Amino acid sequence: MVWLPHWPRIGEMTSIKLGLDRIKTLLQLLDNPEKKMPPAIHIAGTNGKGSTTAFVRSILEQAGLKAHVFTSPHLERFNERIVLAGREIQDDYLFSLLEECRLVVEKNSLEISFFEGITVAAFLAFSRIEADVVVLETGMGGRLDATNVLDRPLITIITPISYDHTNVLGESLTEIAIEKCGIMRQLSPCVVSMQTDEAAYAIEKFAENLGTLLIRYEYDYGVFLEDGKMRYKDHNLDILIDPPSLPGYHQFVNAAASIAAVRAVYGARITKDIIEQGVKKAFWKGRLQKITSGLIYKKIPEEWEVWLDCAHNESGAQTLGAWLRDLPDIPTYLIFSMTRNRDVNKFLSHIDNLKRIICSDISSEPLGYKGRQIPPLIEDEEKLKICEVVTSIEEAIDLISRIDPDLKKKRIIIAGSMYLVSDFFRYNSLSA
């Protein structure tokens, strides 16, 4: 298993400079693999990128198409990031690709970041393994993201935009939206998911100036909850299907953007049955995922629930909070931490009716808060009263087992950081 590849190492670059010059130079030295891989569906946004990627991939595969997929970050295995025609990349092939890149980088005295290096390795693999389409998720932003080197993607998707990485992408939703819009191309249509008015206006002005055709949520397609099912509509289709496999109404929105994009590319080939099966079978690890196996599942009483969610910004917390409010009223315990560039108070302001907030260290993220550092940051006195401090997921679960011992049912939510969710997966995969 590869936790992190041998090269490139995170933080190895001596200087961090935004721009595409470095990756374009490396791609040219490798004979431009990005020009030889299958056509791509390119996805940017703040929230829902990964889920949208999962829906797109699942629908394509139900249609009998082979898809390469590039996502980030990973939760258990680095290999999750690079999927070749339906299968995660194998360790030995990944190693050989990264060695190929490393030798070229060192021979030419290039500076390459971790994300640039793995993106180029993925493009090499995509150019050499047969497939019909590439589903490509940006890492951060869009305009200067390492994935943004394609001349003409099949279509682009902009998922919901909110405040995140403001130190890099801008302080306003307008600035952030413009950065995300950098993946647009004049001759490639763009599906725009649900947006705030400010972000929507910025996207529309950008597309107008570029000459990009937009396929807009609530104008060109829409989605509704109807009798427990999902109704999807566009100008040529009106279907009522089973709800998505991923929980939460926000996944209706992500699924709808995926359907709109795939239908814009492949048309009537994407039938109602293909859509329904694709939406039902999509899976995206750590996104409102209920745990039903593993070491922790074996340790806890049968009546308990354990849920993982990779929500790590205010918008993600809003979605998580709304989902929790729709659930049956069961005593709920939040195992929580964040990376130090995140706003603890904004996140927690959207999560209510908690029995305890268990503040934990994040072992897989050096830039994460220590559990003991979080309570002094909390401004809400009622939430501060229910805080506990631990150093690990294991310690958090053990503490919850001792708290309120007379309660038969308990719900545990692990959220605030993708790396905290990753910690859970590593612990849960240990042998009992």
Image (cartoon, grey):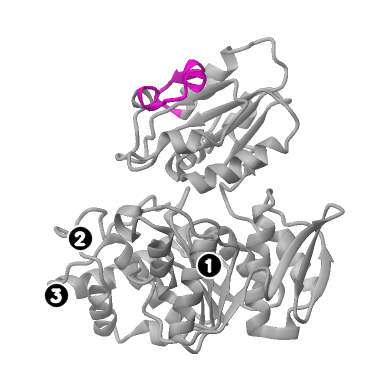
Total number of numbered discs in the rendering: 3
> Where's residue 418, x and y in %?
46, 45
Horizontal side of residue 72 vs 130, given as left or right: left
Where does the image place residue 182, in percent across and percent down from the top left?
Answer: 40, 74
Q: Nearer the viewer, mark 3 or mark 1?
A: 1
Marks 1/2: CA–CA distance = 31 Å
Residue under pointer 2: 16
Please state if 359 lies on the left or on the right of 290 as rendered.
Answer: left
Q: Residue at x 42, y 43 (%)?
A: 419
Q: Which mark is residue 200?
A: 1
- Distance in Å between CA atoms under marks 2 and 3: 20 Å
Three-letter code for the amino acid on which mark 1 is drawn: Ala
Q: Residue furthest bottom?
A: 187
Q: Secondary structure at mark 3?
A: helix
Q: Are marks 1 and 2 in contact (CB under 8 Å)?
A: no
- Of 154 and 283, the residue lying toward us: 154
Magenta-tinted stretch: 374-392
Please state which of residues 268 and 203 is positioned toward the viewer in this rendering: 203
Residue drawn at x 84%, y 65% is 240
Q: Quadrant of residue 295?
A: top right
Distance from Cα at disc 3 to Cα at disc 1: 45 Å
**Residue at left 64%, top 56%?**
283
Q: Residues within 10 Å of mark 1 (few under 14, many from 20)?
A: many
| Helix, strand or loop at mark 1 | helix
